[in-house]
């Protein structure tokens, strides 16, 4: 059953899963902690959700401030082996102390990973990161040379990303994936792009589409229409059946009949449930993609663990989001208003994936 | 409906992998008290918008197996069996602990670095080490370039 319509089997499955998700919310075990260590970036991508620039007013967070939170608030309350720390930006490689940060995090027993655009990832830098305990890395790779460079607004960005993935593939035991942000220009070339990735030896691939936030909000050329979105879903479903490359659609949005067919799991938003972030200004929030005004505290003012345990109500009880087009939606119980990052400053839904599936 | 029932029903619907990431079955031989079934929540497989894949293996490591009884002794409530402690056994254990500590101390001396979660040790990067590595890379690059040049010359000669 494709499109919006849920078959009986999935409907029952989702009902059961709803109970499991409720248990997860009640436990809210911290499993992923983002550290937004910088907002500086060596690119100026058209679709950037953070609106990052080369020079930003917000200075990088000192490593010592993050480690203090880790030592005083997080480590005493979690099993570090069960928590993944993700260094996030901006572009994390513009910081010269990422290796030191990695070593410190590793020394405390945590696994860590990072996302990069690949511009500054040389073989030497990667070796240093691996020695510092890097366990997982994702590289943004948005399409063929013209499409990628158009989005990234840099003539060398495609070649650098390709080269970075080449280095990464050679490191034994390092988990990685390529992330493609699919734009209208790439929809008709997805098969060709898949073949290219496979020929490059890439085994793990993640796709997402652009949501109207940050710089992308102002650029209509980046947004998929309903037909293109449906084409994308069909492509992912087909590719997963083929099994030649592991492909997942990212976590955003409930997808009706495509649930479990375009990603490994049922839809759920884990922001504030098992995912927390420490933003560059010290704000404590869910995912880094969630807008700034959903911050639940600040490490310079509050105790992180107290915030994680006792606040985060808007993330864990989404009843407040049952308004506008969600008010009477028949799949509310499975979707709960979509990902937190899809809510604007006033709490209104900016983009509904389910309604795109006409 | 409890957690395991939900998982079981999802499995019957062919949707267990969409709802949990690992289900470890208890051995039939083990009694109920020894049952160490573990169902991990799925949240470590959610591909976050700006996230990275969860590393395989070491994170969310399965619970260690419960020790099997090797000698008759007093059973714990959870099914493990306590071995009777004699003076000889205590001395043996102390020796084992000392030997382990000494081995660990040696390892730390040998590789001045930080341990990975899986027990490997990362060597601390010093300026000297970085310079050494750069030298190694340069030497490798030069050797490769030399080999490529020689190959090209040989091909040329063969053509002639």
Image (cartoon, coloured by chain):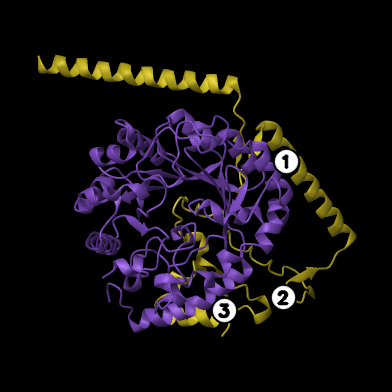
> Residue A194 vs residue A33: left or right?
left
The chain that appears purple in the image is: A
Q: Mark 1 or 3 closer to N-term?
A: 3
Q: Which element carries disc 3, helix, strand or loop?
A: helix
Query: Is B19 rendered above or below residue A217?
Result: below
Q: Nearer the viewer, residue B61 or A23?
A: A23
Q: CA distance from mark 1 to mark 3?
A: 44 Å
What's the chain of the residue with tag 2? B
> Residue A227 vs residue A290: left or right?
left
Residue bearing mark 3: B3
What's the chain of the residue with tag 3? B
**Residue A144's image quarter?**
top left
Q: Nearer the viewer, residue A199 or A178?
A: A178
Image coordinates for residue A311, horizontal then vertical, percent: 65, 62
| Palette colour of chain B | yellow
**Residue B86's image quarter?**
bottom right
Question: Quick one: quadrant of the N terminus of chain B?
Answer: bottom right
Q: Mark 1 or 2 closer to N-term?
A: 2
Residue bearing mark 2: B79
Residue bearing mark 1: B103
């Amino acid at each position: 059953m494709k499109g919006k319509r849920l078959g009986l089997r999935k409907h029952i499955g989702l009902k059961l899963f709803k109970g499991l998700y409720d248990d997860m919310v009640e436990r809210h075990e911290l499993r992923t902690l983002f550290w937004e260590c910088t907002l500086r970036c060596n690119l100026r991508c058209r679709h950037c959700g953070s609106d990052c620039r080369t020079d930003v007013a917000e200075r990088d967070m000192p490593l010592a401030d993050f480690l203090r939170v880790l030592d005083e608030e997080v480590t005493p309350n979690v099993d570090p082996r069960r928590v993944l720390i993700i260094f996030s930006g901006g572009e994390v490689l513009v910081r010269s102390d990422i290796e030191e940060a990695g070593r410190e995090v590793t020394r405390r027993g945590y696994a860590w990973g990072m996302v990069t655009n690949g511009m500054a990832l040389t073989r030497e830098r990667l070796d240093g990161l691996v020695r510092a305990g890097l366990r997982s890395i994702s590289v943004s790779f948005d399409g063929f040379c013209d499409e990628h460079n158009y989005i990234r607004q840099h003539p060398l960005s495609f070649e650098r990303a390709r080269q970075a993935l080449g280095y990464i593939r050679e490191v034994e035991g390092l988990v990685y994936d390529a992330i493609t942000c699919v734009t209208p220009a790439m929809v008709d070339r997805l098969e060709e792009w898949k073949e290219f990735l496979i020929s490059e030896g890439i085994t793990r691939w993640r796709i997402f589409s652009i949501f109207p936030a940050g710089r992308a909000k102002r650029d209509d050329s980046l947004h998929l229409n309903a037909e293109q979105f449906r084409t994308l879903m069909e492509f992912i479903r087909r590719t997963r059946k083929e099994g030649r490359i592991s492909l997942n659609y990212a976590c955003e949005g409930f997808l009706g009949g495509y649930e479990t067919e375009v990603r490994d799991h049922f839809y759920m938003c884990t922001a504030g449930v098992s995912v927390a972030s420490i933003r560059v200004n010290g704000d404590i929030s869910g995912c880094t993609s969630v807008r700034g005004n959903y911050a639940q505290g600040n490490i310079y003012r509050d105790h992180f663990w107290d915030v994680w345990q006792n606040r985060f109500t808007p993330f864990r009880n989404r009843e407040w989001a049952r308004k506008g087009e969600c008010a009477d939606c028949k799949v509310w119980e499975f979707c709960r208003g979509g990902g937190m990052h899809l809510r604007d400053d006033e709490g209104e839904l900016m983009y509904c994936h389910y309604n795109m599936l006409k | 409906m409890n957690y395991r029932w939900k998982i079981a029903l999802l499995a019957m619907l062919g949707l267990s992998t969409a709802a949990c990431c690992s289900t470890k079955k208890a051995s039939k031989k083990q009694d109920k008290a020894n049952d160490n079934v573990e169902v991990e929540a799925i949240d470590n497989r959610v591909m976050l918008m700006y996230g990275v894949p969860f590393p395989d293996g070491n994170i969310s490591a399965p619970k260690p197996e419960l020790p099997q009884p090797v000698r008759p002794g007093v059973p714990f409530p959870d099914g493990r069996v306590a071995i009777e402690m004699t003076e000889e056994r205590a001395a043996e254990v102390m020796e084992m602990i000392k030997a382990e500590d000494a081995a660990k101390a040696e390892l730390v001396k040998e590789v001045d670095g930080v341990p990975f979660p899986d027990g490997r040790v990362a060597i601390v990067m010093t300026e000297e080490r970085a310079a050494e590595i750069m030298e190694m890379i340069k030497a490798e690059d030069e050797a490769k370039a030399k080999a490529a040049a020689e190959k090209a010359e040989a091909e040329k000669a063969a053509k002639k």
